[in-house]
Amino acid sequence: MSDPAELRRQALLDLERRTYAGSQTYLPCWLGIAAGTGLIHTELLITVVVASMFVITAVARTILHRRFAALVAGHAVLAGVLFRSLLLAGCAQFGAVVAAALVWPPLRPAELMVALIGLVVCTAATIALSLDPWCRFGLPVAMCGPVVVVLPLPQAHTQMISWFLLPLYCLYLLVTSRYVRDDYWDAARAGLLLRQRAVELERLSVTDPLTQISNRLAFDRRLEQEWARAVRERQPLSLLILDVDHFKRLNDAYGHPVGDRCLVQLAATLAANVYRSVDLVARYGGEEFIVLLPDTQAEDATVVAERLRSAVAALVIDHDGVRVGITCSIGTATVLPRPDGDPSSHAIAVADQALYRAKAAGRDRVVTGEADRKILAE
């Protein structure tokens, strides 16, 4: 399922990005109008006052823009209020200039230009920002509201048809913006669902379906990373390979469901007894498990292995009132990786050979593998 809160946060970030560049165009548009109509020469004070109004809004939007992502992450509601307030304030300012040009003689030369630019800005902004209801309904109101107020005034140089065209224009905006809104939210939900499914598929690809711990693919990836890090930092790396003793006999005696339950409880026990977050427990195949211990000396690896062996030996599987106990054998290997040394497969082979020696020696024990003496000596 999609996360509504995450979708709203992403939509808010999209809205702010879409509007930031537009919020910086009010001042250039006004200066162009003032220069083109001669207001900059005939009404310099008015030109400066209106320009100052747009400068204040632009500066406020710039400050908000630089901190918006962090504000959304920490206080999404506050971020939304500040953003929408500044956005609608900027539109209302331009709408007020349009309305003033209709009724105030000093601004009469700019009437046509500010009206045309106001319509373009209102149309583009409403459609582009229609994903948010405050913007979809608020922008036409903020931009056209001042004009509606002055239309009935006798000073307004408008024809009666304006009374009909303006409502039709706003209705058109609401109808067309609805489709843009629906398309955006459909795409946003689909995108979020795809991302969530990708994350889940990645998790499933590196998780053993029975035991819910890491699988061999996850182990191989992590081993490659830790091996490269150990080479760079010249740190030892240890491996433990663990195998359940007489697992086939247990399956034959009690059935595969009990064997599966045994593996599940065994995996949980191993994970609970490996304390460092950098260590990794994975199912290596069948009844074999492997433990990766970065930056761990041979003696410390043996301590961890003995702790795991004891924890497994204490496990009891309840089957129809019969208490079934299990044991395991563990082989360890510790190497000091280096660029021209043996590959990581050598460490696995050393631990695997130690595991077989543990089984040959009677099982339920830990055997330390013979690591590469030359590498460790250096």
Image (cartoon, helix red, strand yellow):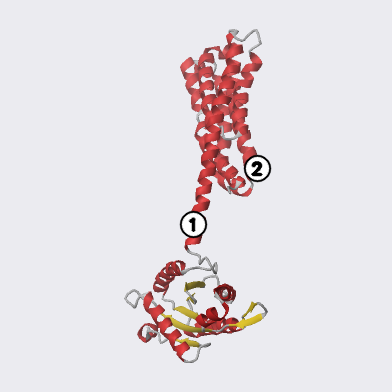
The residue lying toward the viewer, choosing from 61 and 56, is 61
> Does 318 sit above or below residue 369?
above
Does residue 93 show up?
yes
- Most foreground residue, 348 or 52: 348
For residue 301, side relative to residue 104 (left or right):
left
Q: Name the quadrant containing residue 8.
A: top right
Check residue 78 in the rendering and tell me which mark sits there, or answer none: 2
Where the C terminus falls, by quadrant? Answer: bottom left
Q: Nearer the viewer, mark 2 or mark 1?
A: 1
Q: Residue 37's spot in the image, x, y percent?
A: 48, 15
Q: Residue furthest left?
A: 340
Along the viewing direction, whichever of 331 and 244 lies nearer the viewer: 244
* Residue at horizontal 56 percent and vertical 76 percent from the top: 255
Residue type at mark 1? Answer: Leu
Residue at figure coordinates x 46%, y 17% from the top left: 36
Q: Amino acid at mark 2?
A: Leu
Q: Nearer the viewer, residue 239 or 142?
A: 239
Q: Classify mark 2: helix, strand or loop.
A: helix
Task: Please tell me how crowded label 1 is: few (under 14), some (14-19), or many (20+) other residues with Cα within 10 Å.
Answer: few
Whole-angstrom CA distance, mark 2 to mark 1, is 35 Å
| Residue 49 visible in the current orientation | no
Q: Position of residue 141 (x, y in %)?
A: 63, 24
Q: Is residue 134 above or below residue 325?
A: above
Residue under label 1: 201
Return the disc, 2 or 1, that comes first in the chain's sequence: 2
**Number of numbered discs on residues:** 2
Q: Position of residue 100 (x, y in %)?
A: 60, 16
Image coords of residue 302 (percent x, y) = 51, 85
Secondary element under disc 1, as helix, strand or loop, is: helix
Q: Which mark is residue 20?
A: none
The part of the image, by quadrant, that contains residue 150 is: top right
**Label 2: how many residues lie within 10 Å, few (<14), some (14-19) or many (20+)?**
few
